[in-house]
Amino acid sequence: MIVDLITIKDSQTAFNFLLQANEIDLESETAKVRNTTKVEANVKKGIAQTDVKGKIYTDLEIECSRCLQPTENSFEIPFSAVFVTPENYTEAKEAELKGEDLEVSIFEGDKIDLKELVREQILLNLPIQVFCREDCKGLCQKCGANLNLIDCNCEEKEVDPRWAALKNLK
Ligand SMILES: [Zn+2]
Ligand SMILES: [Zn+2]
């Protein structure tokens, strides 16, 4: 979804659109988009900057941090971003925007890529850890088995060193 600022006549324009899962490549090894992502964006064209505010509704498949099985997660991500052209990105502007704690993107020309913005916002909002369930047992450190599914008995096989010594005698 490319917004051509030249064609925006009104100071504020709403862009509501859908992105198919294959249109958003998160380039992440642990997360990917599952379904259609819905985006509501409001673009406000100013003289020195363009503000884009809105909300992203997306379903992601994220690896469980413990057992690496895919988990399904729905997110509602509110965002607020500012686009500034290089000539308008002065030190004063930088300081002003930093103070407001906004995502700042520098762009050339008159076009803003909302799809890329959506991708960035999803990545920024990925949880650090995701668990398939609260008591996920994770993977066995020894054999890599998913301990939620099987009991590999590696722990029990951990032989008492005294027995190990006996075993070697045989
Ligand atoms: Zn898990
Ligand atoms: Zn094991």
Image (tube, rainbow, N blue to C red):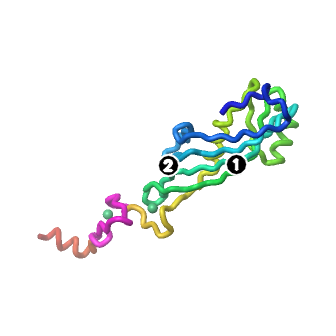
Q: Which residue is mark 1?
A: 55
Crowding around mark 2 (Cα neighbors within 10 Å: few <14, some 14 to 19, many 20+) is: some
Give the overall secondary structure of the magenta segment.
loop
Q: Position of residue 1 (x, y in %)?
A: 65, 33
x then y, percent, for residue 112: 72, 31
Q: What residue type is disc 2 on?
A: Thr
| Residue 34 as seen in the image, left or right of residue 8 | left
Which residue corresponds to the image point at 79% horizontal and 33% vertical from the top-left? 84
Q: Which residues are magenta?
A: 140-158
Q: Quadrant of ligand 1?
A: bottom left
* SS of the residue under disc 2: loop
Dot 2 or dot 1: first in sequence order is 2
Q: Is residue 138 visible?
A: yes
Q: Classify residue 169 by image quadrant.
A: bottom left
Dot 1 surroundings within 10 Å: few (below 14), some, or many (20 or more)?
some
Q: Residue at x 43, y 59 (%)?
A: 67
- What secondary structure is found at the residue carrying circle 1? strand
Q: Is residue 102 magenta?
A: no
**Where in the figure is residue 7, as x and y percent of width and height?**
78, 26
Kindly tell me whether residue 154 is visible in this rendering: no
- Rendered residue at 75%/24% (across/down): 109
Task: Please identify the quadrant where the C terminus is shown.
Answer: bottom left
Say which mark, if any, is on residue 30. 2
Cα distance, mark 2 to mark 1? 23 Å
- Res 166 quadrant in image: bottom left
Front in this rendered view, residue 45 or 131: 45
Dot in front, 2 or 1: 1
160 on left or right of 25: left
Q: Is residue 100 left or right of residue 70?
A: right
Amino acid at circle 1: Lys
Per the image, is 148 magenta?
A: yes
